[in-house]
Each structure stands twice: as C-alpha cells, then as structure tokens.
Amino acid sequence: MIRVHELVKTYGEFRAVDNISFTVPPGEIFAFLGPNGAGKTTTIKMLTTLLKPTSGSLTLDGLSPATHQTEVRKRFGIVFQDPSLDGDLTAYENMDIHGVLYAVPARLRAERIESLLKLFELWDRRDGFVKTFSGGMKRRLEIARGFLHTPKILFLDEPTLGLDPQSRNQLWGHVKNLNESEKTTVFLTTHYMDEAERVAHRIAIIDHGKIVAQGTPDELKTQTKTDSLEAAFLALTGNSIRDESANAGADNLRQFTQMWRR
C-alpha cells in the first residue's frame, strides 16, 4: 500500500530525510517513530502530497504523491496533531462538510456519519457544538471523520497526545476495530511507546533522517536486548533531548487546507 525507496529530502546542505526505504502492506498498522526533529513530519508531508522529494521514490496504492496528487488525496485520510475541527459547528456538521469535500454521495454520507458517530460513541452528541466537547471527544470525532470517505490509508500524527489513559485505550480500540473490519492501512506516529507496542503490527524508527531499525515490537526488543519498546527506542536513538518547532503541526494543517484550494 505504501512503498518508499531511497527517499531523500534536503534543505540546502541539510538532509531532513536521508535515503530511507520501507514498505507498508495493505491492512497493516505501521508505527513510524522517532525523536523530535528526526524526519517524521517531513516524511509524512511527502507521503501526503505536501512536499516533493529531492530524490528517491514513493507510492501510495501504486500512485506517486508527487505526480498524481488529486488521486492520491482521495485515497487517504489524515488526523493532524493539532486540532482541525470547526468548534462553531456541530459534530454532525463537521462530518457532513468533510463528506461533501470528498464527494461522498448524500445517502451514503448520512449512513457513514451515523455508523461512525455511533462507533465512536458520539451519536448522542451529534447536534452538540464541538467547542463544548472534551479533548477526548474531539479526538474521537477527528478520527471518525478521517474514516468517513472510506480511505485506503489513514495517517494519524500523534492522535492521542494529551489524552488520559482511558481515552487513549478507547480510541485505539476503535481504530483497531476499523482496521480489521474495513482493512484500512494505518500509518501512525506517537511518542507513547506503550501504545505503539500494543497496536502496531510493525515499526520503523527514524533518527537524524535515517531509519535505524525496522521490525515487529518483539523483533526490535530482541535486536536491542531490551524488555520493552521504550527501552529499545532509547537504545537505538539515545537519551539526548531533541527540539522541534512548536508550529510544525499547525504548519501541516495550513498546507493541507491550502492544497484542497488549488
């Protein structure tokens, strides 16, 4: 479903992504992990048509995001780290507008909205204004919206950041349910190693623009002779603190919004 081969993205002399390769088969939950500034965001931008690679190749469902932007955008959904809902609209209206943008037929749109809002336990609040929702409710709504147009791939960028353990556990339960029932490929980033270990079929760890390890959680633990994914992650990437722009998520959202205006 996703193929990345010798992918490079440079800014002047700086290599943000340095010759990385990986594949994600259909229906897999794939975690892309790394410290702040490791190259995760740049890679996701290239996969989701927001940036063009400097060199190398990548395809989503057999199409290049660089040359088939419109067709590729129809094939994926995305949930950014920063909020992207309209707080002055109801939950149902946020879903409905998304369906219109993706040209989901009216009858199917209504059926999908009801089904997804019920699954994510938001149907009773469908007429409530989003600005009155808790953080966990907003996150559930954003992910429900991401599934609305039945994408082949769903990108989740730090989807549970700031949520309490109960909300995180519930949200991943819903995502795994839809991954299994609709065979949606899930590409996720997270700093919560415990949830990556619990939900991901396979993991790639990127650091300083290079992929330093790939495999199942158990394979990564065996490779590093550790007993948890967090310990394996630290063994592979070190203990130094990394900095990242606080506006990275907001920049992604602005670019993604602008892309649909082209």
Image (tube, rainbow, N blue to C red):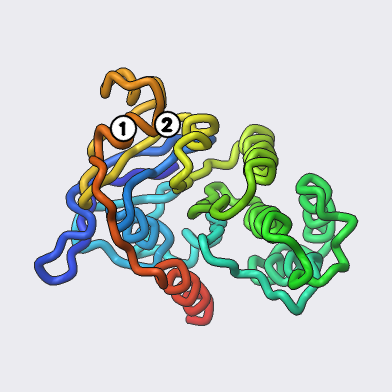
Residue drawn at point x = 33 percent, y = 46 percent:
34
In the image, residue 102 sits, relative to residue 119, either above or below, namely below
> Residue 90 placed where, x, y %?
80, 71
Name the element at disc 2: strand
Q: Are marks 1 and 2 in contact (CB under 8 Å)?
A: yes
- In the orientation shown, which residue stands out farthest toward the front? 240
Residue drawn at point x = 43 percent, y = 40 percent:
31
Q: Residue 158 or 135: which is nearer the viewer?
A: 135
Image position of 215 (left or right of 90): left
> Residue 36 placed where, x, y %?
33, 55
Name the element at disc 1: strand
> Residue 211 placed where, x, y %?
24, 42
Q: Which residue is mark 1?
A: 214
Mark 1 Cα-neighbour bin, 10 Å: few <14, some 14–19, many ≥20 = some
In the image, residue 134 sits, relative to residue 224, either above or below, namely below
Mark 2 Cα-neighbour bin, 10 Å: few <14, some 14–19, many ≥20 = many
